[in-house]
Amino acid sequence: MHYLLILSLLILSPLYAQAESTQPAGTRITISATAERELPNDEVVITYRVEQEGKDANAIRQQVNRVTDLIHKRLQKEAALKIKTTSRNMQPVWHYPKNQPRIRTAWRMSQSEEITSSNLEAVPQWLETIEGEGAQLSNLQFRVSRQLSLQTEEALRLQAIRTFRSNAVALTNGLDAASFRIIHLNSSSQSPRPVLYRSEMAMMAKSSDAVAPSLSAGEGTVRITVNGEIEIPFIDFPAK
């Protein structure tokens, strides 16, 4: 019996110690802080497609390749410009006579391309090149580049943490405490939204006489939010 009691105490003692360690040593308060900065959009993304339809699959394939190659050759001379193919497909065009099997009347081929560049001043010239060679503009957007966005996020994260600590100090002083400790801390980011010109691109694609619209790159806001919990030692306050 004596040995059983000692064994029980040995088992229960760590459990009591663990239970005591999980109890808060003070008042816990949740704090959030935000830092943001407005940045000029320094990158442009243009998407366009080359489409052809006809009965001869080889002929329309060669036509799509020809238009695409001409655009590539003209744009690849530009500095700080990247071109990539995002999709390419060929599909049959069907006719459905009443009460008869469907009939393939033609082939339709489409190839989509994407241009990315930091040379914003050359955008009107590139739009003219794309349409001049027979391609259709799909979308144009100005955005904050990934490199600038990441650099700004790092600076804003440190700024938000400093604000978090300042808020924690103010709360600690308000409770007449001498110190605080951070229980946990995490951060989240909100990337700027790009400036889109879909309607303008659709207008230019429909009209061969359309003049290139006046475009503004605009700005975007990068925002960092820091959330966390602090613990301030318990203090006995007088009732009066």
Image (cartoon, rainbow, N blue to C red):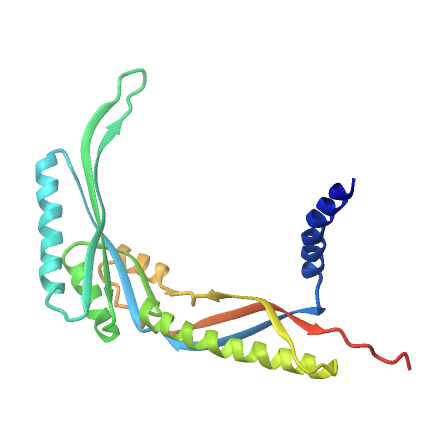
Which quadrant, please, contains the N terminus?
Answer: top right
Instruction: Identify the image quadrant of residue 215.
Output: bottom left
Estimate the x, y position of residue 147 in percent, counting from the top left. 32, 70
Indicate whether 27 appears above or below 240. Answer: above
Quarter of the rendering containing residue 80: bottom left
**Residue pushed farthest top?**
99
Left-right relation of 153 to 231? left
Residue 201 drawn at (x, y percent): 31, 60
At 15% across and 37% down in the image, what residue appears?
A: 54
In the rendered image, the quadrant that contains the C terminus is bottom right
Looking at this rendering, what residue extends furthest in the right direction?
A: 240
Residues 87 and 148: in front is 148
The residue depicted at 58 percent of the width and 76 percent of the height is 164
Q: Residue furthest front?
A: 2
Tell me if residue 201 comes above or below residue 174 in the rendering.
above
Q: Quadrant of residue 2?
A: top right
Q: Nearer the viewer, residue 179 or 1?
A: 1
Q: Residue at x 12, y 64 (%)?
A: 76
Q: Nearer the viewer, residue 19 or 43?
A: 19
Q: Is residue 168 left or right of residue 20?
A: left
Relative side of 239 to 35, left or right = right
Q: Is residue 3 above or below residue 222?
A: above
Image coords of residue 210 (percent x, y): 26, 63
Tally of numbered discs: 0
Residue 141 place in picture, x, y as percent: 33, 64
